[in-house]
Amino acid sequence: MLTVEDLNVWFGHAPERVDAVGSASFAVGPGESFGLVGESGSGKSTILRAVAGLIDSWSGRIAVAGRPVAGSRRSRGFHKTVQMVFQDPYASLHPRHSVDRVLSETLHLQGMDRIDARITRLLDQVGLGQGFRFRYPHQLSGGQRQRVAIARALAAEPRLLLLDEPTSALDVSVQAEILNLLADIRAERGLSYVLVSHDLAVVAHMCDRLAVMRAGRIVEEMDAASLRAGRAQGDYARALIAASAGYVREA
Amino acid sequence: MSPLLSVRDLRVSFPTRSGTFQAVRGVSFDLGRERLGVVGESGSGKTMTGRAILGLVRPPGRVEAERMALGGESILDLPESRLRRLRGARISMVMQDPRFSLNPVMTVGRQIVEGYRLHTGTSRAQARDKALEMLAAVQIRDPERVFHAYPHEVSGGMGQRIMIAMMLAPDPEILIADEPTSALDVSVRNEVLRILDRLVRERGMGLIFISHDLNLVAQFCDRVLIMYAGRVVEELPARDLHAARHPYTQGLLNSLPRLDRPVDRLAVLQRQQGWRDAPPAGTP
């Protein structure tokens, strides 16, 4: 579904050039859910943004559903295949567009027919119902906004969702609802996910496999079972898992 | 021994277009030389409780309480001038994000020195030594360099340690830490916690640790208050958090994905109207 080979991403020009990602490679199969974990600044979100076409200073190979992409230009077909959900539900919705407008504009752009019926279905699918259709973002809670963002991503009927910390701005009880929703959608539609998160427990819950990143490089790839068991190969991944387990008081 | 801080029936309210909104509705607790965790979701009133203690609720917000006493002395409805002498010197607060609480156009050292001199009236040279000593105390390896750095030149974890150094320089009796580690990576988080932990144990400081992270609070604190809709719904020793009895606390714990306990589906919290009004579990 997604192949990333030898990906390098940089920002700025020498001598101030910052290398955000260095020779990262991974592949995500159809229907698979893949996690990218690491601390802030490790390059995990940057990889998603490069795939989505939000960054043009990259080299290497990115292919979606077998089709290679280049630079930051993406075809209509690409957006029908790949959609992204962002971290901050407060920043990713236009404050003066109603839910109806957000969804109908997206559906229109994707060249969909029966827009009205589709909006009804999308809202049902993300558990919002018709009562929310003509509301504005400020009338919605954080969790409800993230549901709208997910509905917008689903409007194109994509096959791959790029999820950038989709629940880190939410309370834990709301996080549980959104993670359940994402799991249901994946099961129903057979979607592939790439999930970026700093929360190892969230990734273990949602993903089959994951890559651990550090300073722009993928230092290790493992499956969720190894993550849960703390079976990391390298020192860094092992330390990260240990630190995530929580705080141990000094005697 | 009388507690460091004693709060009875604290209420914080704000007038809105649709009537009065009560952010905190009758919170009572005592703080000793301990780590007291305050957990709850956004909007549960935990931050407002901290701000009310420091006198940081601005009009039209109203703070009322039966009692709010620091070392036996009432700190309720103090004039701003008296509050200023209290704030920083005897009670301090560390906020969530160092990027918003440090002055971006002033070097780190100057900010610490200014705050310290304001409360202690020492000479510039003494304050400078104190600032360097505090930076070293929060495990900053090169205090001299950080002293001359601007906030944008340091990382988030470093910024939070600087905030802690600044807040602790006047040696307060109580530190209110509002989500001090939520913006930090896990490795840095544990370092910051270790510093706070040491301060409580070595200086006998009282710490109010406000957090949304139940597991962290269970591991770090001595005692926990669980807040819901402006009230304390449950109070219990931190080590017993996983045996919590209130359905809200249980619901929060169950909704967290855990590395050591795989589940097919996460439990979803079913909120009940009664939680808003019921007396806290465990009280007679």
Image (cartoon, rainbow, N blue to C red):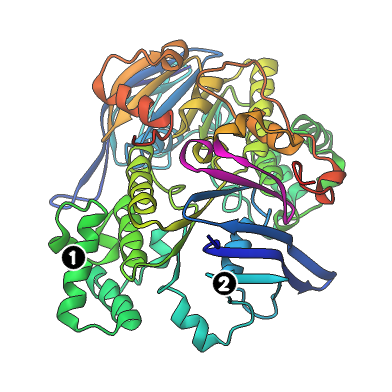
**Residue at numbered disc 2:** B72
Lower sequence index among marks 2 and 1: 2
Could you tell me which residue is drawn at 61 percent across and 69 percent down?
Answer: B52
Could you tell me which residue is drawn at 43 percent across and 28 percent down?
Answer: A245
Where residue B18 sits: x, y (%)? 85, 69
Q: In the image, what residue type sits under mark 1? A: Leu
Could you tell me which residue is drawn at 60 percent across and 19 percent down?
Answer: A191
Where residue A6 sits: x, y (%)? 26, 23
Q: Is residue A179 left or right of residue A120?
A: left
Q: Which of B49 and A42 is in front in this view?
A: B49
Count up the numbered dots.
2
Numbered circle sitting on residue B132: 1
Quick one: label 2, few (<14), some, or many (20+) residues within 10 Å? few
- Work out whether B146 lies above or below B262: below
- At mark 1, the secondary structure is helix
The magenta segment is: B218-238
Query: Is residue B240 a member of the stretch shown in magenta?
Result: no
